Image: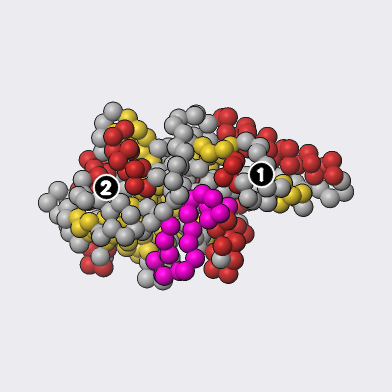
Amino acid sequence: MFTTKLASVLFVASTFLLVSQATPLGQNYRRDEPAPVTPTADDHQIQFGYEGDIGPPYWGSLDPINWGLCNKGTKQSPINLYDALLVPNSPLSFSLGESSSGLSLTNDGHTLKVVFNVEESSKYTLSAYGSKYTLQNFHVHTPSGRLSFKVFRNLKIGICNFEIKKNTYFGTIDFVEHRYNGEYHDLELHFVWMDAANNTAVTGVFYDKGDAPSSFLQTAFVNPSPPPTTKDSPPAPLDLSDSLLVHKFLEATVHDFTNYYAYDGSLTVPPCSEGVKWHVYRDVQILSIEQHKAITAITKWNARETQAYNKTAFGIACHTH
Ligand SMILES: [Zn+2]
């Protein structure tokens, strides 16, 4: 029995290594300082972060009652996207406003987030799944790269009743939010939509570093001065009404959402609620290296590791005979 279990563990370990080796190295972002932490928007007293004892592997156990899905959910996000999830030539139905006032850039301790006030939110709608969603915010995740398993140094990983003790090093893991066929991207932009019953839909856009700056990211996340560098910084008001930048961006990218990956997943932060309708745009946008540097100087590393889609990604069968 032990041999079988050990073989399973070694299989898992080798799977991690294979997955890691299959992805390009890119830049390694090693966090030199603790992730910013803060109570969640509902004044939750328990803090979460992206490394150490409050990092993603611990989220579920930090608050088992409210955040238990982070560890025990079966449809968690982000995942490794693949072609079978692609929805081609079936554009999502957006109705987009043309005013972009009433916005503010905030730092909630986990991400930079452009928040829409109620009036502005009502101008941007997504009609899908028999419901109408309004745009609540858009925010960034800055993944790309890999961390050694030392982020799990205090974690006991139980697989098939075989427990890997703490301080075990057996590879690296990519913290990337969504991936496509194992590839990761330098930044992921999430537009969060919510209907009257608080059901959530997210439209995601990938960015890679390149030669051309993104005027949208520049105006929304880089130009505001002073930027909200910490959760205690006052929000930076944004008035994009002259440039109609949000509208133009959505028009050019999300509005033309004809090729996207769709699946039922979860929030990628606690409480990791499931039932989230995910749509990740296939085409990758470009931001400049300078922009990426400016944004990551504030957000640092705020990406959750890839989750097993429907808990089957590892393909493990736990034999007990
Ligand atoms: Zn997000």
Please determine whether, in this image, residue 22 is positioned above or below residue 194. above
State the image quarter where residue 65 is shown.
bottom right
Q: Kindly state the secondary structure of the residue where label 1 is placed.
A: loop
Please determine whether, in this image, residue 124 is positioned above or below residue 50. below
Query: For mark 1, what is the residue?
Result: 167
Q: Which residues are magenta?
A: 37-57
Residue that appears at 37% across and 71% down = 196
Residue 41 belongs to the span the image colors magenta: yes
Q: Amino acid at mark 1?
A: Asn
Residue 160 belongs to the span the image colors magenta: no
Residue 221, disc = 2
The answer to whether residue 67 is left or right of residue 205 is: right
Q: Decide: few, some or many residues near mark 2? Use Cα within 10 Å; few <14, some 14-19, many ≥20.
A: many
Say if residue 195 shows up in the picture: yes
Q: Kindly state the secondary structure of the residue where label 2 is placed.
A: helix
Please determine whether, in this image, residue 20 is positioned above or below residue 5. above
